[in-house]
Every structure is written in structure tokens, then in C-alpha cells.
Image: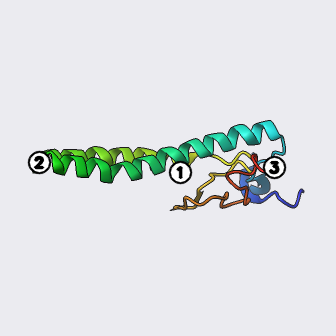
Amino acid sequence: MLEHEKTLILPTFITSGSYKLEEAPLAQEICKDPVVIHQGLAKVRNRRWILWAVILIYMPCLIIALKMEASSGTLGTLFVAWLVLLCIAVGLATVVRCPRCGNTYHTNGPTFLPVRKCVHCGLAVNADKKK
């Protein structure tokens, strides 16, 4: 077994009615193809840009709505629309996979961490741009 592989012991049912334990791989083979890594990191960077753009657009939209003297209903609608966009952006950033290890790039268990490295293998978000 390779040292980077993790295994899980799974019970399998044998026809005699008893159980037998087998190992099943949890992690995918680590990818070292630079083209695959570049494409995967481009996707990660794109999802990060979407997330930060949605976060940063809230304040200018709020200021514009307040200067236009929008009603509280309009402000509430604007906030709900922004919240929906934020949930979608976080969802997209949460499920993006690391091109090297195949695990989710920003998520470790239930925790979403929008950091600049994969929380599993440590692949930097701009590793394909460094020479």
C-alpha cells in the first residue's frame, strides 16, 4: 500500500451468512500531471473569485440602495437576494475538488475554510503559476 493512501475496513457479507472484513481505499491516487493540476487550480481560483466578489458586492449595493432612499421592503429583498447568492457561492467553493488529492479543496469535514492551500494535501492555490 502506498504511504499516502488511507484505507477503511468495510464488512462484506459472505454467502455462508458471516461477515468478512476487507480494505477499501479512501483517497485517490495523487495526481502529478501539470495540465490536470493547472485546470483544477483554475477552477478553484474561479470559485474563490466568485465567492469574494459576492461578499464584496454587498456594501456598494447597500450604499446605493440607501442613497436612493429605498424602502425597507426593497432593502429586505436586496438582502435576501444577496444571501441567496452568498449561499450559492459558498456551496460552489465548498464542493470544488483539489486536482492533486481529489478531496474537497476548502472543506475538512463540516468545516469550510477558504484558505489558500488544500486543507488535505497542502497544494497552494497558485502552485501552477510558480516556476
In this view, the residue in front, 46 or 7, is: 46
Q: Which mark is residue 69?
A: 2
Q: Residues within 10 Å of mark 3 (few under 14, many from 20)?
A: few
Q: Residues within 10 Å of mark 1 (few under 14, many from 20)?
A: many
Mark 1 or mark 3: whose residue is earlier in sequence: 3
| Callout 3: SS | loop
| Callout 2: SS | loop
At x 17%, y 51%, the residue is 66
Query: Which residue is identified by label 1?
Result: 94
For the residue marked with disc 2, what is the amino acid? Glu
> Mark 2 or mark 1: which is in front?
2
At x 67%, y 52%, the residue is 125
At x 73%, y 55%, the residue is 123
Residue 100 horizontal/vertical position (percent): 76, 48
For the residue marked with disc 1, what is the amino acid? Thr
The answer to whether one can see residue 44 in this image is yes
> Mark 3 or mark 2: which is in front?
2
Q: Which mark is residue 70?
A: none
In this view, the residue in front, 86 or 3, is: 86
Residue 88 horizontal/vertical position (percent): 42, 44
For the residue marked with disc 3, what is the amino acid? Ile
Q: Which mark is residue 30?
A: 3
Mark 2 or mark 1: whose residue is earlier in sequence: 2
**Whole-Å distance between the Cαs marked 2 and 1?**
36 Å
